[in-house]
Image (spheres, helix red, strand yellow):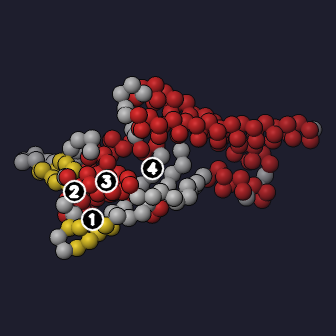
Amino acid sequence: MTRLPAESVAPVPARAGDRTRKLNATSYVVLGMLCHGPATSYDLKQRIAYTIGNFWAFAHSQLYDEPMRLVADGLVTESVEQGGRRKRTYSITRAGRKALRDWLATPTREQTEVRDLGLLKLFFAAFGEREDLIQLARDRYESHRARADGYLKQHERIVDVADEWQVKTLELGLRYERTVEQFWADFLAELEADKQDEK
């Protein structure tokens, strides 16, 4: 599914003492995930991998830094395990929930940014070889088909347990992948038909 850059999210100020820090997309990802219950950074990474990781890309290293910043902002609390690995578990505060609600209420009019390597190669395909273009179309078709099939299986697993809006994000991802899969399938058929005509 389409991946959006973190910069496209309108920042909402969060106050911590005398300073103000603008929250970014990762801030809201952490706050949103903590609404499901307390978590360590590793827990957050696991939760995200199976959910929004399908459509929102960012460095997982941010999941170790951002919770601590949110603690400083007063939006998250932490408890540190005594002894052992001194594991840190984070929980969202009332102020954190309010910051998330405020963000959810802000207008979302940014255009979707598509960063698709296959589309980029297609744009410059006139400077390459015909066989490479055919292989590109075949690769992209198979890739999007596999992703769509994976989404379909995931949908079957979660449809009865996830909340309805989480299911909707998966449904949009499935529609997107099927649409792009069909584009590459049609294009591949065109290329192969042209190849036959040249013989």
Check contact, mark 4 vs mark 3: CB within 8 A: no
Q: Rounded to the nearest whole Å, what is the CA distance between mark 2 and mark 3?
A: 9 Å
Residue 184 point in image, percent of width and height: 70, 41
Badge 3 is on which residue? 100
Check contact, mark 2 vs mark 1: CB within 8 A: yes
Residue type at mark 2: give it.
Answer: Ala
Circle 3: element type: helix
Badge 1 is on which residue? 14
Specify few, some or many for label 4: CA neighbours under 10 Å numbering under 14, 14-19, or 20 or more. some
Specify few, some or many for label 3: CA neighbours under 10 Å numbering under 14, 14-19, or 20 or more. many
Residue 63 seen in render: no
Residue type at mark 3: give it.
Answer: Leu
Compare marks 1 and 3 and give the one earlier in the sequence: 1
Query: Taking 13 as reference, is 2 left or right?
Result: right
Compare marks 1 and 4 and give the one earlier in the sequence: 1
Query: Taking 191 as reference, is 113 left or right?
Result: left
